[in-house]
Amino acid sequence: MKGLIVKFEDKLCKAGIPGSGVSLLATIAHYDDPFWNIGGLKVPDEVHQIWNGGMLKVGDRIEIEFAEFDEASEPIAEEKHSCCKLDNSADDDPEIWKHKLDTYYELKKVLEEEHIIEKE
């Protein structure tokens, strides 16, 4: 599998999910302490896996290598990812469908008038 080998301080991890991807995130914001983490979403199970992370301070170095390996390090945490299962039952309401269809035709007309799409 392809993934990331990440070295931070004295820790090394291989982050990869067969058939999925991983990401390294570093966040520096004025309202919060800087931090980093590495994780990915295992599909179709919809399980968010986290390998490593922590707080950052000036002078810290994170080494990242894109690599191919047979086995990833064991994640330090796994959480069921639930945002992919949205309740769309409200879409069954005929009034909502009418509103969506009206919006579609209004937007289609604007795009045709601007010659962005051709009139049918």
Image (cartoon, rainbow, N blue to C red):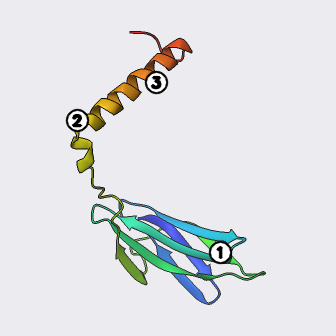
Horizontal side of 13 relative to 54 (left or right) equals left
| Residue 102 x/y as whole percent | 36, 26
Q: CA distance from mark 2 to mark 1?
A: 54 Å
Horizontal side of 56 relative to 90 (left or right) equals right
* The C terminus lies in quadrant: top left
Residue 87 seen anywhere in this rendered image of the structure: yes
Q: Secondary structure at mark 3?
A: helix
Residue 74 seen anywhere in this rendered image of the structure: no
Q: Nearer the viewer, residue 98 or 112?
A: 98
* Residue of label 2: 94
* Residue of label 3: 107
Amino acid under label 2? Answer: Pro
Q: Residue at x 61, y 90 (%)?
A: 10
Q: Is residue 3 above or below residue 12?
A: above
Are the residues flagged by discs 2 and 3 in contact, CB closer than 8 Å? no
Q: Secondary structure at mark 2?
A: helix
How crowded pointer 3 is (Cα within 10 Å; few <14, some 14-19, many 20+) is rated as few
